[in-house]
Image: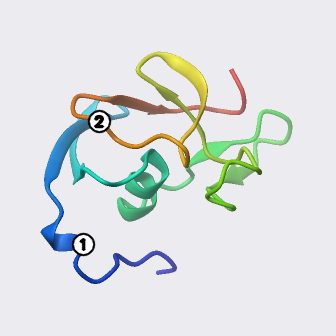
Amino acid sequence: MAFRLAAGADAQPMIEVTLDGAPCQARATWTVADLLLAAGVTPYRRSAVSGAARAPFCMMGSCFDCLVTIDGVPDSQGCLRRLAPGMRIERQAGPA
């Protein structure tokens, strides 16, 4: 597995969010991309052009491979959005 939790991650408080309609527990300090990577969600999204599987790559907002719908807003960059209690996250196929 390429993604591992950092030392001390277990000490961070937990919050509840919804991922593709299902309740999910996550660390309050995580971004949306962190949550999907830690949960082992694959594919993260699919390219609108080829249908190829995509996943977060740069984790700094440059590549746009982490697009998700957050609280009803499509094309949100998951790597730049910190989780918030009650946040609704949905994977999407390419840009909306």
Look at the image and tell me in which quarter the C terminus lies: top right
Q: Which of marks 2 and 1 is nearer the N terminus?
A: 1
Image quadrant in which you'd find residue 75: top right
Identify residue for label 1.
9
Image quadrant in which you'd find residue 18: top left
Residue at horizontal 18%, vertical 40%? 16
- Using residue 21 as the reference point, say whether residue 57 is left or right of it: right
The secondary element bearing badge 2 is classed as: loop
How is the rendered protein coloured?
rainbow
| Distance (Cα) linking label 2 and label 1 | 17 Å
The secondary element bearing badge 1 is classed as: helix
Residue at horizontal 34%, vertical 75%? 5
Please provide percent x and percent y for residue 1: 46, 81
Image quadrant in which you'd find residue 82: top left
- Using residue 40 as the reference point, say whether residue 63 is left or right of it: right
Please provide percent x and percent y for residue 88: 34, 27
Q: Do the residues labelled 2 and 1 touch (CB within 8 Å)?
A: no
Identify residue for label 2.
84
**In the depicted view, which residue is nearer to us: 37 or 50?**
37
Numbered marks: total: 2
**In the depicted view, which residue is nearer to us: 11 or 78?**
11
Disc 2 marks a residue whose amino acid type is Ala
Tag 1: Cα neighbours inside 10 Å, few (<14), some, or many (≥20)?
A: few
Tag 2: Cα neighbours inside 10 Å, few (<14), some, or many (≥20)?
A: some
**In the depicted view, which residue is nearer to us: 28 or 66?**
28
- Using residue 5 as the reference point, say whether residue 95 is left or right of it: right
Please provide percent x and percent y for residue 43: 57, 52
Disc 1 marks a residue whose amino acid type is Ala
Please provide percent x and percent y for residue 79: 55, 49
Where residue 80 is drawn, which disc sits there? none
